[in-house]
Image (cartoon, rainbow, N blue to C red):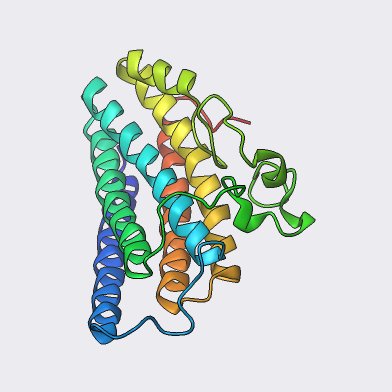
């Protein structure tokens, strides 16, 4: 691994942890200010973009954590293991924050009846096709399970099975390709929250996700190139 790539890996890792700590602190302050008072009038509803993003991104992050643990167990490459650890640690922390906000807002962690995954982003035609970072047609995704891929960029059950069975460099390449797709979908979702969500702390978290995951996308492109591979078309 080149010195430049090593510096980028360390920078991404440090930035991700710093962002997690920053947003965790903001959430703690917000919770403390709320105390035992009645919910403020601006508390999000179950159908809001704030709640939808929190629910969907929590599921999205959980799969990233799962994929990271899968590759950690099937490769000895320290660079890939370090990246997997950073992703798992950061996204597990962020997932806890998202679920914590739903608890704070006293909202369910499952979508309301009749509202499928990504419904909070299916309010206009700007997000169909490949218009937003290769995002799938969210209106066509409502209530659907694409072999386990509920949201943009998520791996299917078959792809997770292939990652589980792969070993060595083959596993590393597959992980980097799947996680590249996963991050691109996550960036699209985070940008959606940044433009739609109304809770300032959640908007800041979404904006931070975009920055951190774009940096990791650059890193993963370099790691794929070093292995004679590239992101999937």
125 w.r.t. 198: above or below: above
- Does 119 sit left or right of 39 as displayed? right
Q: Is residue 142 left or right of residue 190?
A: right
Residue 232 shows in this picture: yes
Q: Along the line of sight, which residue is nearer the eye, 157 or 11? A: 157
Across and down, in percent, residue 133 comes to 63, 49
Q: Quadrant of the N terminus?
A: top left
Residue occupying image coordinates x 42% and y 16%: 162
In the picture, the quarter occupied by the C terminus is top right
Q: Nearer the viewer, residue 40 or 203?
A: 40
Residue at x-position 55% and y-position 41%: 151
Q: Is residue 29 above or below residue 150?
A: below
In the rendered image of this protein, does residue 46 appear above or below residue 200? Answer: above
**Of 19 and 154, the residue lying toward us:** 154
The residue shown at (69%, 54%) is: 122
Q: Residue at x 43, y 72 (%)?
A: 204
State the residue in front, 180 or 121.
121
Residue 207 position within the rendered picture, expressed as x and y whole percent measured from the top left: 47, 67
Residue 126's quadrant in the figure? bottom right
Q: Is residue 227 visible?
A: no
x and y percent of residue 170 in the render?
39, 17
Residue 177 rendering spot, x and y as whole percentages? 48, 31
């Amino acid at each position: 691994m080149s010195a430049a790539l090593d510096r980028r890996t360390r920078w991404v890792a440090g930035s991700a942890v710093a962002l997690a700590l920053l947003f965790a602190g903001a959430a703690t302050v917000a919770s403390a200010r709320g105390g035992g008072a009645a919910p403020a009038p601006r508390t999000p509803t179950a159908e809001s973009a704030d709640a939808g993003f929190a629910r969907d991104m929590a599921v999205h992050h959980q799969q990233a954590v799962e994929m990271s643990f899968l590759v950690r167990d099937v490769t000895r490459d320290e660079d890939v293991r370090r990246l997997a650890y950073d992703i798992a640690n950061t996204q597990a922390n962020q997932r806890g924050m998202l679920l914590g906000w739903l608890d704070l807002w006293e909202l369910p962690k499952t979508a309301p009846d009749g509202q499928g995954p990504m419904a909070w982003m299916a309010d206009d035609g700007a997000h169909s096709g490949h218009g937003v970072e290769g995002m799938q047609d969210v209106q066509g995704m409502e209530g659907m399970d694409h072999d386990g891929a509920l949201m943009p960029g998520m791996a299917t059950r078959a792809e997770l099975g292939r990652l589980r069975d792969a070993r060595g460099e083959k596993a590393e390449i597959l992980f980097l390709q799947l996680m590249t797709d996963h991050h691109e979908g996550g960036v699209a979702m985070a940008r959606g929250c940044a433009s739609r969500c109304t809770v300032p702390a959640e908007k800041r978290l979404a904006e931070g996700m975009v920055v951190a995951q774009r940096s990791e996308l650059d890193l993963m492109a370099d790691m794929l190139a070093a292995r004679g591979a590239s992101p999937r078309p």
